[in-house]
Amino acid sequence: MTPGSGTDDGRVLHVRPLANRASYVASSVPGVDVLHAAFSDHRYDRHAHPTYAIGVTEGGGQAFRCRGADHATGPGLVMTFNPDDAHDGHAAGPDGYRYRMLYLAPELVLDTVRHAGGGRALPLFREPVAADRRLAAAVRRAAAALADPGASTLERESGVRALVEILTGAGGARPLPAARVDAALRRVREHLHDHLADDVTTAELARVAGLGRSYLCRAFRARHGTSLHGYQRALRLSRAAGLLAQGHPPAFVAAATGFADQSHLTRRLRAAYGVSPGAWRALTRRAGPLAAPR
C-alpha cells in the first residue's frame, strides 16, 4: 500500500502502483491483523482465512471469485469476507490494485454482538463487495490507528470496535437507568484524568464503569460528543499546553502527558492548535497564560 493513497473523509487518491509489495502487521489489539498491499500483477491462489477479512480498495481494481460467483472491486469499495470464505484475487486491469485489509478474529466480532444484547451466532455477510462509504471510512480509520506508532491503545481499540459495530449493526442494547450511566461515565472521566499519561485500555475503562465495552463506548459518545480516545487526547493536549506555557521543554511535556515522543506531540498540537510546541511555549510566555483553543 503506497502511503497517502486514501483519506479519512472517503476520498481516494489514484496513484499507479510501481511494484508488487505488501506489509502485514500483527497489531497490538488482540484478534486484529492488518495488511497494506500494492500489486501490479500478483495473483492470489484460491485460499481462505479463519478470520473475517474486511478491506478497502484504494486504487485500481481487483477481481476475484468467491461463493460461486465472480466479483470486482474498485476505489472506495469494501470487501467483506466471512471466515473460511474461499477466494482468489488478481488485478482487474493494467493499473494493478492497492488495498488495505483488516483480519478480525471471530471471537472479537462475537464479543461485540453479545455486549450489544445480540445472540450467540456469528453474523455473516451476504455479499463479498459493498459500496458503503461509512464502512470504508471506518476501515481506513482503524487501519491508520493500528499502523500509527504514536497512537494510544485506547485509540487503536476504539477504531477497531467502531468498525466492528458498523459491520455487525450493534447498538440496540436495552438502555440502562440514567443515574447508573451518569455515575459510570463520571468514574470513567475521573479515571482518564487520574491516569492521563497511562496507556489505558477499553477493557480497563469498562471495568471502572461496570458496563460492557460496546455499551460504554456508545454511551460516552452520546453524552460527550466524542469517543473515549478523543476525550483522552483532548485531556492530554490541554495538560500539554499548560506545561508548555509554564516553560517546560517539549520532550519533557510529551513524556509527562502520554504522547509517544516529541514528534507525536508536535503533530497533535499543530493539528489541534495550529502551532508547534515551541511556538506555543514562546507565544504563551510572551502574552501570559492563554486558554487552549476549544
Image (tube, helix red, strand yellow):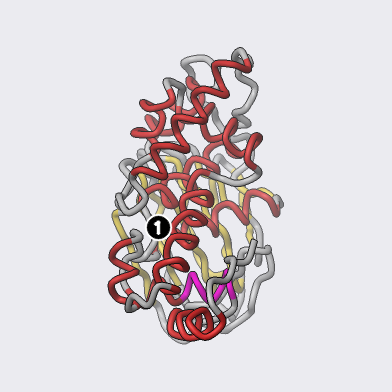
Please state which of residues 276 and 20 is positioned toward the viewer in this rendering. 276
Please state which of residues 57 and 34 is positioned toward the viewer in this rendering. 34
Against 204, is 95 above or below? below
Question: Residue pushed farthest front?
Answer: 288
Number of dots carrying numbers: 1
Instruction: Give percent across and percent down for residue 270.
Output: 53, 76
Q: Main secondary structure of the magenta part?
A: helix
Against 128, is 108 above or below? above
Give the image quarter of residue 9.
bottom right
Q: Name the residue under label 1.
A: 146
Please state which of residues 239 and 268 is positioned toward the viewer in this rendering. 239
Q: Residue at x 33, y 75 (%)?
A: 248
Q: Give the range drawn in magenta.
A: 267-273
Q: Which residue is drawn at 64% across and 61% down?
A: 294
Q: Which residue is drawn at 35% across and 60% down?
A: 257
Judge whether residue 256 is colored magenta: no
Give the image quarter of residue 147.
bottom left
Against 288, is 56 above or below? above
Q: Residue at x 39, y 68 (%)?
A: 243
